[in-house]
Image (cartoon, rainbow, N blue to C red):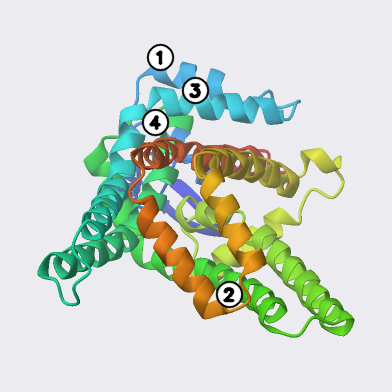
Amino acid sequence: MADQWIIRVQGREYGPVDVETLREWKAEGRVLPANEARRANVDLWITASEIPGLFDGTMAESVEAEKIVKPSPRQRRSFARILRDALHIYAKGFFQFLSFTLLVVLPSMCGQLATAWAQTASNVTGDPRTLAADALAFCMMALTMVLWPIYIGGIQIFTAEFAAGHRIGFVAALNQAVKFWPRIAVLCIFVYGVFFLLLLFALGIAAMLVSGTPSLLLVFFALGLLALQVWVFSRFFINVLFWQQFAVLENAGAMDSLRESRNLASSGRSLPWFQRPVWRGIFIASIWFAFVLAITLAPEWGTLRHYFNELMTTQDPQALLEKLTVAQRAHGFDIFSFFLGLFQRILQPLLGIAFVLLYLDCKTRDAKC
């Protein structure tokens, strides 16, 4: 009689079923290597990646992956090891990660090039070339937004497969990622939408200070609003650190992903602060944001200084907007900044890989970090 297996996802157990049924669930994206599993007559839980015949992969690849991503059961993976393993997995699966990156990079590049081309057109209202370029840029931006959830899902799936010592083709990973699209799309709208509203709130505070009559009361009021905005932003940022991992690797629903992400971020209170998942996640995100700021602001430093001087010397908001628009047109298309942005997008999967490894490091110990 074939072995019967039970799969545990989000605390719920499914089965017992045979390996053939598990293969069907795997094809549907319902079973991932990181999911917990056990034989029906055995109480020892393992991961689905260890079920014989379920996930393809040679013994050599499994041994190599264990060396890369599996820490000693007596010792937590250090922060440096998470970063090192992320680099190793990215290098090992570079072309697979690049394939998913190109899904969102190519439309974005086309939109940027169309916008740059439109800036070279005449300033005549209704110019056909300008209208066509603007329409193309808008379509490319919309396509990028549509493909973004697939990109997120693909990075999670590829990383989990490589971490388990398996290789998966681009088409197979794409099919699995597409199945997660509705859930990830809803979460993207919510998470990015909240961040956007918080950004608008901060810009509103700045506009209030610039347009209002300077007074001590106004300054204190603005500082109070700014402190509130920073607190709300930081709390929300912490709560959604791991939503992508739960939405894909745990196959959790939208609300469950947000709730479990918050629970994981607040866990590990008995550990030293620098070993808790929230601080490790913040460190990983901070390293990435510092890198992005460095390659984004460095070539634009002169332009930013000009904008700041205009902001300090111009009191009329409309006149300020006109000056900034003229300066932007005069600045034109910066090919160096364009390629720096492309370089950043190619390396961006490293951020997702590091978070998946951090998530797996917490989950595989069953110690709630």
Q: Is residue 367 left or right of residue 67?
A: right
**SS class of the residue under badge 2?**
helix
Judged by depth in the image, the label closer to the viewer, 4 or 3, is 3
The percent position of residue 196, horizontal first and vertical second, equals 54, 70
Q: Between disc 3 and disc 1, whose residue precedes?
A: 1
Closer to the camera, 120 or 367?
A: 120
Q: Between disc 4 and disc 1, whose residue precedes?
A: 4
Residue 323 in view in this figure: yes
Judged by depth in the image, the label closer to the viewer, 2 or 4, is 2
Q: Between disc 4 and disc 3, whose residue precedes?
A: 4
Residue type pointed to by label 4: Pro
Q: Which mark is residue 200?
A: 2
Residue under numbered circle 1: 60
**SS class of the residue under badge 4?**
loop
Q: Between disc 2 and disc 4, whose residue precedes?
A: 4
Q: Which mark is residue 88?
A: 3
Q: Are marks 2 and 4 in contact (CB under 8 Å)?
A: no
Q: CA distance from mark 3 to mark 2?
A: 39 Å
Q: Is residue 177 above or below residue 181?
A: above
